[in-house]
């Protein structure tokens, strides 16, 4: 059960608990096995680069966040690695070698296939949900599955009081329009500036409030257009037809954009916890109404029904998690002609240590005398590097190192 840091410190000082894990910091009580636990809700906001995660507790004084983390994915790194591999294989095929027919007809993609870069995101999120379930009494999961809810755009009366009041509908609508018009002004094409929802056929000329009549415009364009019709405002013929046809077309990519998010929800269903799915419009609405800053973990805290009123302690800092992968298969470094520059890589483990382990080193003599703790990089010589928060110390003997936490595919800060 997550407790206050001060309480954890007191328990450790009195010897009533021991450190079980550094990241996320977990202690284990020595004097009892069970205790009072309150159910927690795990809240997730999956993003393309970073996923926000928060644990929310419903206590006597309302809901509050007790733990938060930002998980940085390695989607781009995977993409790059695969591009390199493809290039190398292609160059090999172009060399003058004999033709080999493909051996198996095994190139079919199974249903629900996701590209490796997206799959790694799904697995990262699932991995962390499972990890946290092991450490804390999670009883439910709330996840943001879509940026905007097309259902609610078509039929605003689907559910919830806010929908009927039309306040939240505005958020869904804005997100939808931002995605559809690629976050740019429809008339001048400018990006990165505040955009306003604009009626293509003005209301005064009988234009409707349907999504197909709405677009986004920057303030100057919006004011210039005022209540003029789009035909008199946009002089360029081709531009006009583009805007009009684009407005009529429904957003096709919405499904693709949301594919990963649904895949995550599907994977999380394996944890056999009650799962609730929410839209991004609602998250944004919750966050803005409570006046919280924009961050991935804060978005996670504001997901769904339980995010409408949630207390985030001002001193709470998220755990920064970076997915690193587990090294490459490349055996030796090459020179610029592609010949091996170094001997093949020795084994991954050196004297029981592995790159990525978090260690504490006490050096008693020599130039490096002192105490260091941080992330380890092994060398086959047995003289390791330790990366602390501020610097990298080279040449630390393996005998001086003690493991605090084994490498688990993530880097922490
Ligand atoms: Zn404009």
Image: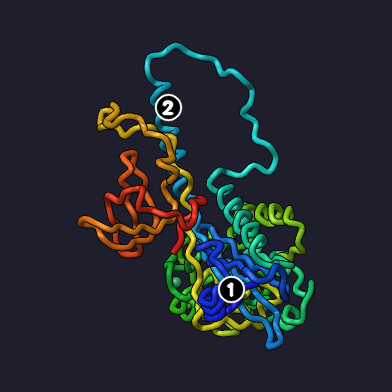
Residue at 74% across, 67% down: 139
Colour treatment of the image: rainbow
Q: Do the residues labelled 2 and 1 touch (CB within 8 Å)?
A: no
Q: In this view, does 105 lie above or below 16?
A: above
Q: Label 2 crowding class (10 Å Cα cut-off): few <14, some 14-19, many 20+?
A: few
- Quadrant of the drawing holding the C terminus: bottom left
Q: Where is residue 205 in the image (x, y as percent from the top left)?
A: 63, 78
Residue placed most toward the observer, 200 or 35: 35
Residue 225 percent across, percent down from the top left: 49, 77
Element type where label 1 sits in the image:
loop
Horizontally, residue 37 falls left or right of residue 329, namely right
Q: In this view, does 258 lie to the left or right of 219?
A: right
Q: Where is residue 234 in the image (x, y as percent from the top left)?
A: 48, 68
**Which structural element holds mark 2?**
helix
Left or right of 365 in this view: 187: right
- Quarter of the N terminus within the rendering: bottom right
Q: Which residue lies furthest to the left in this view?
A: 367
Residue beneath disc 2: 90
> In the rendering, which numbered label is found on residue 16?
1
Rounded to the nearest angstrom, the CA distance separating label 2 from label 1 is 61 Å
User: Which is nearer the eye, 68 or 347?
Assistant: 347
Tell me the residue at 50%/67% (across/down).
Answer: 319
Give the quarter of the image for residue 163: bottom right
Identified at 71% across, 74% down, the residue is 35
- Residue plotted at (41% across, 13% down): 97
Above or below 43: residue 288: below
Label 1 CB sits under 8 Å from any ligand 1 atom: no
In the drawing, what numbered circle is on residue 95? none
């Amino acid at each position: 059960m997550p407790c206050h840091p001060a309480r954890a410190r007191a328990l450790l000082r009195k010897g009533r608990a021991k450190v079980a894990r550094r990241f996320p910091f977990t202690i284990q009580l020595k004097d009892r096995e069970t205790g009072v636990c309150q159910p927690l809700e795990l809240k997730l906001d999956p993003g393309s680069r970073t996923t926000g995660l928060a644990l929310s507790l419903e206590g006597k004084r309302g809901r509050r966040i007790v733990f938060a983390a930002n998980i940085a994915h390695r989607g781009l790194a995977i993409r790059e690695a695969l591009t390199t591999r493809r290039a190398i294989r292609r160059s090999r095929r172009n060399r003058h070698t004999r033709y080999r027919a493909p051996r198996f007809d095994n190139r079919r993609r199974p249903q629900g296939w996701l590209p490796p870069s997206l799959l790694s995101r799904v697995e990262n999120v699932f991995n962390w949900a499972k990890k946290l379930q092991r450490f804390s009494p999670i009883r439910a999961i709330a996840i943001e599955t879509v940026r905007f809810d097309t259902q609610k755009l078509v039929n605003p009366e689907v559910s919830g009081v806010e929908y009927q009041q039309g306040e939240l509908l505005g958020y869904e609508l804005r997100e939808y329009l931002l995605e559809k018009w690629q976050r740019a002004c429809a008339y001048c094409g400018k990006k990165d500036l505040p955009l306003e929802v604009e009626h293509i056929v003005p209301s005064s000329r009988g234009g409707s409030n349907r999504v197909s009549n709405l677009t986004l415009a920057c303030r100057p364009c919006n004011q210039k257009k005022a209540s003029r019709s789009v035909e008199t405002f946009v002089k360029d013929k081709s531009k006009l037809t583009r805007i009009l046809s684009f407005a009529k077309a429904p957003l096709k990519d919405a499904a693709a954009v949301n594919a990963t998010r649904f895949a995550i929800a599907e994977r999380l269903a394996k944890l056999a916890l009650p799962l609730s799915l929410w839209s991004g419009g609602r998250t944004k609405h919750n966050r803005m109404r409570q006046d919280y800053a924009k961050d991935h973990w804060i978005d996670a805290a504001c997901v769904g029904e339980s995010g409408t009123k949630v207390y985030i302690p001002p001193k709470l800092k998220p755990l920064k998690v970076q997915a690193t992968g587990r090294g490459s298969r490349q055996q030796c470094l090459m020179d610029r002609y592609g010949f091996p520059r170094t001997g093949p890589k020795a084994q991954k483990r050196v004297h029981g240590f592995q790159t990525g382990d978090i260690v504490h080193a006490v050096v008693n003599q020599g130039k490096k005398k002192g105490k260091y703790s941080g992330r380890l990089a092994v060398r086959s010589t047995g003289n390791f590097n330790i990366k602390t928060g501020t610097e990298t110390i080279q040449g630390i003997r393996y005998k001086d190192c003690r493991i605090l936490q084994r490498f688990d595919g993530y880097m922490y800060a």
